[in-house]
Image (spheres, rainbow, N blue to C red):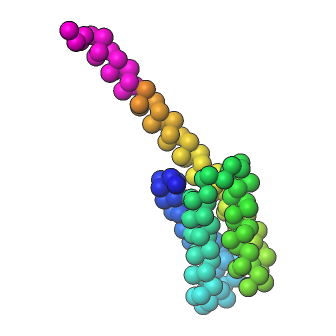
Amino acid sequence: MNVKRLVIATILGILSGLFCMYGAIAKFPEFASDTLLLIGIVYNRALIGIMIGIADNIDLHPALRGAVIGVVVSMAMAIFDASWILLGFGLVYGVLIDVVTSKTISKSSKNEDRRSQTIQVHQDDNETNNPVS
């Protein structure tokens, strides 16, 4: 398990949950008094992030993997609340979280590869310039 991926995906999940909560209150002002529903929305999106963070070994395209995880995790809340819009947004947030996390981790690993290659080149130069007799 890639801890960096888990942290990034979880943070994105929490941010998605807060954004989704804000959208729910803006669209349906009566939800502002339903604290459990709002906490459930944030928890649900955070859980999507956590699941995406630990699902890096599932060999699917990040958009498809995120969509499946987003739908599966959001299904319980959508059925319980009979609000299928939560399911649709779970799919969208799942795709966004997985794609952004995968791109971020991919860029990070490429930068680490470049750094290790640079270090190796410098080590090779030092060995060439300072031969051991």
Residue sitting at 57 percent across and 81 percent down?
A: 39
Q: Position of residue 21 (x, y in %)?
A: 61, 75
Q: Position of residue 54 (x, y in %)?
A: 57, 59
Looking at this rendering, what residue extends furthest in the bottom direction? 33
Q: How many marks?
A: 0
**Whether residue 17 is visible:** no
Position above or below: 133 against 9:
above
Magenta range: 118-133
Q: Position of residue 104 (x, y in %)?
A: 54, 47
Give the prevailing secondary structure in the magenta stretch: helix
Task: Assess whether residue 124 is covered by the magenta stretch.
Answer: yes
Question: Could you tell whether 76 is left or right of 55 in the image?
Answer: right
Question: Could you tell whether 73 is left or right of 131 in the image?
Answer: right
Residue sitting at 68 percent across and 58 percent down?
A: 66
Residue 88 occupies quadrant:
bottom right
Task: Assess whether residue 60 is covered by the magenta stretch.
Answer: no
Please state which of residues 91 and 4 is positioned toward the viewer in this rendering: 4
Residue sitting at 41 percent across and 31 percent down?
A: 115
Please state which of residues 86 and 125 is positioned toward the viewer in this rendering: 125
Position above or below: 23 against 129:
below
Q: Position of residue 100 (x, y in %)?
A: 60, 51
**Whether residue 10 is visible:** yes
Residue sitting at 63 percent across and 85 percent down?
A: 37
Position above or below: 55 against 78:
above
Residue 117 occupies quadrant:
top left
Tell me the quarter of the image containing the C terminus.
Answer: top left
